[in-house]
Amino acid sequence: MLRNILITGGAGFIGSRLVSALSQGEPESNIWVLDNLHPQVHGLNPELPHFASTVNFIKGDIADKLIVKSAVELAQPELIYHLAAETGTGQSYDEVSRYCEVNVSGTANLIEAVRTISGAVTKKIVLAASRAVYGEGGYRDSMGRVYTGLPRQAQMMSLRNFEVPLAAGAKFPAEAIASNAQLSVAPSSVYASTKLMQEYLLNQTGEGAGWSSTILRFQNVYGPGQSLRNPYTGVLSIFSRQLLEGKKLEIYEDGRIARDFVYVDDVVDALVKAGLQTLPHGTTIDIGTGQAISILDVARLLMKYLGVSDDHYSVTGAFRVGDIRHACADIDAARDLLGWAPRVSAETGLSLLANWARTEFDSGSGL
């Protein structure tokens, strides 16, 4: 079936793989990519990914209203994948206006551009959202009741109390649980707040419109191709570079921060499936593996696959305000609504990342 598809942020880590997957899976479709090739991600002399000849590339910023309008009018997209965003919890504290301009105003620009297309061409917008909107996420207390964890306070963390406080009435001990769209959102960083606003904008403006939104809340995405130069990219890429440079890893808190690391090809598969499914407007689906692993444990695995001795780390007790303690996805909705499940294990994925990172480091590429 011939479709016009627009992918914002389509030259990035996830986006470039999505372009490749769609080019192979829907060879008759017209694919348009909008990306600003930001130097923080792509370097000072960025090279465009090796797209198929049928892919149309527009260099431009999602925060530029005129460029976004032009891109949408050129592409006339029936399907839009909105991946363009600023990422990084720590950086968002220092560059609040940048994150709001790109993530919030950029999404508004896209919505207004879609409205300019005559004939209600666009039918679906799939958003690359973030699990960060859950904040500290869900906890089940000793009575079986589910609570959203309260934000951790810097004062307590400075005393090395890293546990998540619960709302009044919760009975300890409590255990972290996998998060899904039934859980109350509680963003605890500027980045998370701007990602949640993207969801709100799409869901509110899509009501009664000719298009629907599908929200995919990603856990920690990793894999070959993730920027080794960007200090605000995924933690596994940062760790890979540090280990290859012979540095010791500084593991925050007590090493028991837990994350759900999902391989990039599995994420791309979820995006493709979301674009094909007819779902109610505003459907929100969590994408991860459903398994959490501590930062310390995943660091040790990475050392193993990089051939580094397993003493190249120290647990520092340092912390970042806005970081959350435990993250894990409840992927039942992904299975039920998309027919999706992760296929790449942590061991396989980390091995692939380590081999790629070593090759890039040895060649000097991407550094």
Image: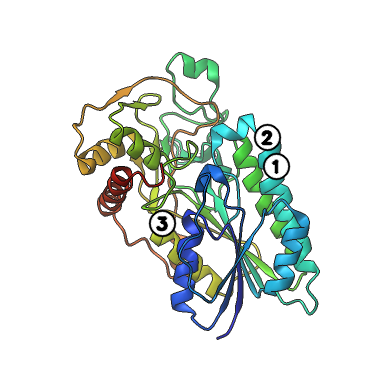
Residue at 45% in and 33% down? 325
Q: Amino acid at mark 2?
A: Val
Q: Which residue is mark 1?
A: 100
Q: Please tell me how many numbered marks the rendered image carries.
A: 3
Q: Which residue is mark 2?
A: 96
Tell me the distance, in whole angstroms, between the alpha carbons under discs 3 and 2: 27 Å
Tag 1's secondary structure?
helix
Residue at 51% in and 46% down? 41
Tell me the distance, in whole angstroms, between the alpha carbons under discs 2 and 1: 6 Å
The residue closer to the viewer here, 135 or 72, is 72
Tell me the distance, in whole angstroms, between the alpha carbons under discs 3 and 1: 26 Å
Answer yes or no: is residue 139 visible: yes
> In the shown orientation, is residue 162 left or right of residue 29?
left
Q: Amino acid at mark 3?
A: Val
The residue closer to the viewer here, 290 or 190, is 190
Q: Measured from the top left, where is residue 366 in percent x and y?
A: 41, 46
Tag 2's secondary structure?
helix
Point out the image quarter for the C terminus.
top left
Tell which circle, 3 or 2, labels the residue nearer the N-terminal end.
2
Evaluate if marks 3 and 1 touch, with contact meaning CB atoms under 8 Å apart: no
Q: Measured from the top left, where is residue 183 in percent x and y?
A: 56, 47
> In the shown orientation, is residue 38 left or right of residue 324?
right
